[in-house]
Amino acid sequence: MEFWIFVLAVWLGVEWLRRRHYQRKNDERFANLVDGLNRVQREISELKKSAARVTELEKRPAAPEAGAQSAATVATPPAQEPRVSATLHGPAPTVAAQLPRLTPPISPPSPAEPAPPSAPPPAPAPPAQAV
């Protein structure tokens, strides 16, 4: 009887450890989920603030007409290429790529032509006659 009580106590201990481990894993998963949702909520609130700021700037009138032309000519920055074109055209060449080559390019060897035969091939022998 004592043996079965011991086995039952060991089984209960193992089950308790398994459940504790399972609960810890679930708690970590839940904490990761909550952290992710909090990050998304912060980003959404930042986007809402940015959208509100954009609509506010769109509704605000620009500078007066007379001053706008003079300010536009002074404050107009030079047009820049979009960032996408840099990836399409590739990086700018470096100084090393612009230096002339010091050695002439080596041409590949031409295939060797077969030498013409020095003597014509022998004429075929006349066929043997059957007796």
Image: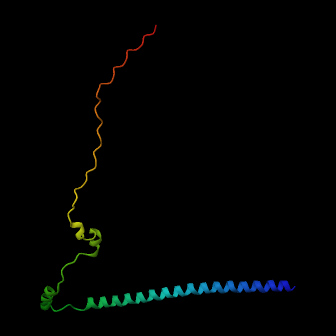
Name the residue at 50% across, 88% down: 35
Who is closer to the viewer here, 53 or 20?
20
For the N terminus, the image quarter is bottom right
Please indicate whether residue 84 sits to the left or right of residue 36 in the image.
Answer: left
Please indicate whether residue 39 sits to the left or right of residue 88 in the image.
Answer: right
Q: Is residue 109 above or below residue 115?
A: below
Name the residue at 83% across, 86% down: 5
Who is closer to the viewer here, 110 or 81?
110
The x and y percentages for residue 77 are: 18, 83
Report the colour scheme: rainbow
Who is closer to the viewer here, 111 or 92?
111
Q: Specify the quadrant of the image occupied by residue 120.
A: top left
Who is closer to the viewer here, 49 or 11?
11
Q: Specify the quadrant of the image occupied by residue 110.
A: top left
Please indicate whether residue 108 sits to the left or right of residue 17 in the image.
Answer: left
Q: Specify the quadrant of the image occupied by residue 102.
A: bottom left
The x and y percentages for residue 97 are: 24, 66
The x and y percentages for residue 93 are: 24, 69
Number of dots carrying numbers: 0
Residue at the right extreme of this rendering: 1
Name the residue at 80% across, 83% down: 7
Name the residue at 68% across, 83% down: 18
